[in-house]
Image: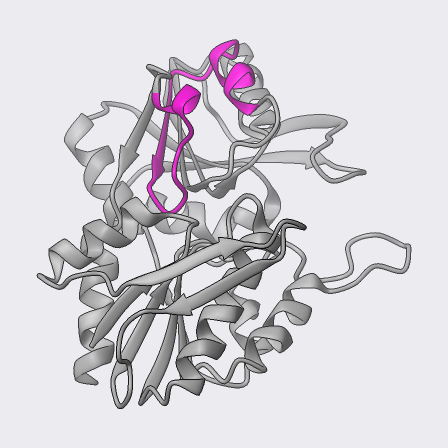
Amino acid sequence: MLLLTGSANRALALNVARHLNLPLAKVSIGQFSDGESCVEILENVRGQDVFIIQSTSTPPNHHLIELILIADAIRRAQARRVIAVIPYLSYARQDKCLYPTQTPIGAKVIADLLATCKFNRILTIDPHSEQLQGFFSFPFDSLYSTTLFLEDILKKNYSRLVIISPDIGGVRRARTFAQRLNAQLAIIDKQRFKPNEMQAMNIIGDVEGYDCIIVDDIIDTANTICSAASVLKENGAKKVIAYATHPVLSGQAIHTIQSSLLDELVVTDTIPLNTIAQSCSNIQILSVVPLLAKAIEDIYKES
């Protein structure tokens, strides 16, 4: 078994390799003067199972192309199996036509693109929707941060707890948390007319006097979660804590979080935080390294 990585999240890949007591295979990744990516594998991969650990995080197109080029190089070097470990899979939010205009289903386009790389398997964490696996014509494994988050919530020993779904689409995820924690469930009913923009929020359920925990898969601009925190506090919530697996945190997200009524944001290391985000006192990071390492080992052993 060989582990290697692109440039998206080298720290995560190194930690997974250490957890498995393996070195990271040597790969040369560079760019031509016009920005075009170039890749060279510096290890013998013939006959081996090769796991490429690469989130397609910011900039997503660049890291996606890197992943594809690495996979092609490994295939041409006659590896036995090539498995893409994509902790954060970009374009997953574009899983349907959302608006009455002529828009692509981006997730399906990416699935078709990855299929051309002839991966034997894809492993990801918290895909945006369950239907995503139906876009792939080869094995697609999903891991979930639910247990990781539940353990952290239980350690903090909240007295009166309500789990908040930030939108109607996240109710299933929130209900799972509520059932496991024997907690109440509430839903934020929001109206969105453009990506990353909202018009109104209403709360379905009782939050007065409760510690509110918002659960979501992605935090991008942080507008939704921070607006939800304001609405929840206005309706009597004691504390508002958000748990989100993938910290995209684009644009002014950190400033939005720091100036909001959100008491704490808990994320994972599927995407590396920039220096400003790392210095933000109300952001906590939980590691998915043990989760990924166990899954990689199980795939390798076919157990």
Image quadrant occupied by the C terminus? bottom left
Extreme right residue here?
A: 101
Residue closer to the observer: 182 or 83? 83
In the picture, measured across the screen, residue 177 lies left or right of residue 17, that is right
In magenta segment, residue 271: yes
Residue 303 is at least partly visible in this image: no
Name the spot of residue 211 as percent of width and height, x first: 35, 21
Q: Residue at x 50, y 85 (%)?
A: 118
Q: Residue at x 59, y 54 (%)?
A: 32
In magenta segment, residue 257: yes
Q: Residue at x 20, y 50 (%)?
A: 15
Name the spot of residue 143 as percent of width and height, x first: 34, 62
Extreme left residue here?
A: 21
Q: Residue at x 59, y 82 (%)?
A: 116
Residue 3 is at least partly visible in this image: yes
Q: Quadrant of residue 125?
A: bottom left
Extreme front residue here?
A: 33
In the picture, measured across the screen, residue 106 lies left or right of residue 161, that is right
In the picture, measured across the screen, residue 204 lies left or right of residue 140, that is right
Q: Is residue 159 above or below residue 120?
A: above
In the picture, measured across the screen, residue 99 lies left or right of residue 22, that is right
Q: Quadrant of residue 109?
A: bottom right
Q: Quadrant of residue 111?
A: bottom right
Tell me how many marks there are: 0
Residue closer to the observer: 174 or 19? 19
Q: What is the magenta range? A: 253-278
Name the spot of residue 113 as percent of width and height, x first: 62, 74
Name the spot of residue 210 as percent of width and height, x first: 37, 20
Q: Is residue 83 above or below residue 302?
A: above
